[in-house]
Image (cartoon, rainbow, N blue to C red):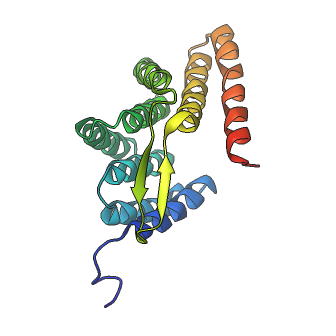
Amino acid sequence: MTSRERPPQAGDFFVLTERGHRLRLAGRPRDAVPAYQAAARRAPPRGLQAEARVNLALALRGSARYAEALAQVSGARRMFAGARDREGLAFANWARGSVLRYVGDIRASRRSFHLAKAMYERLGSRTSYELPGDDPGFVVRRGGLLAAHEGLAYTLCGLGGCARLSGASRESSSTIRKPGGYFRGCVMRTGWR
């Protein structure tokens, strides 16, 4: 049985998502789009389809395909809301704010970032769930305080950028200082370098 004939597996999703991340973060968002699209087609249930759409939206944003990016985020928001995935919904609201900032709609961007911020603050350490992999003994844990801190840090960066673009330098300066503590907390908890 070839990979085209076998049913999608979680490992496919994770490999393709990682490839998309690497390409996007290397400054090649156009090359990341096909990887994220393939990841979305292979996403197993339990919220990964929505997550794949947000990742795709971020690559589309980097490729200046803003309308498509917003459509992907809107679809992901509906999926996360339907699954009652509060962390995913916060992530999608952050992504929407990010795309809107690129579009130049700073007011709408700030609203979306403020919504994401409130959601991440409410999450705190209350969220945690598992995503099954191909191997029944393999489980990826996601959520909790680490994810909330990371999401809040990125959201505050977005709010600071919006304030800067609006000419509110004092607000920008105070907002931009806050994420450092959250990012340091992520490094201490995970050992990232």
Quarter assignment of residue 128 = top left
Instruction: Check the image and name the residue furthest to the front.
Output: 137
Q: Would you place residue 82 above or below residue 28 in this image? A: above
| Residue at the image point whose x is 59% and y is 60% from the top | 22
Q: Would you place residue 181 above or below residue 134 in this image? A: above
| Residue at the image point whose x is 29% and y is 57% from the top | 45
| Residue at the image point whose x is 66% and y is 29% from the top | 182
Q: Which residue is more in the foreground, 17 or 6?
A: 6
Q: Which residue is more in the foreground, 88 or 145?
A: 145
Instruction: Check the image and name the residue furthest to the right.
Output: 193
Q: How many marks?
A: 0
Find residue 57 and report its horizontal and vertical position in percent.
41, 47
Quarter assignment of residue 105 = top left
Location of the N terminus (image quadrant): bottom left
| Residue at the image point whose x is 33% and y is 46% from the top | 68
Find residue 151 and report its horizontal and vertical position in percent.
53, 34
Find residue 152 and report its horizontal and vertical position in percent.
55, 28
Instruction: Check the image and name the residue furthest to the left.
Output: 82
Q: Which residue is more in the foreground, 110 or 186?
A: 186
Q: Would you place residue 104 above or below residue 42 in this image? A: above
Find residue 180 and report its horizontal and vertical position in percent.
72, 28
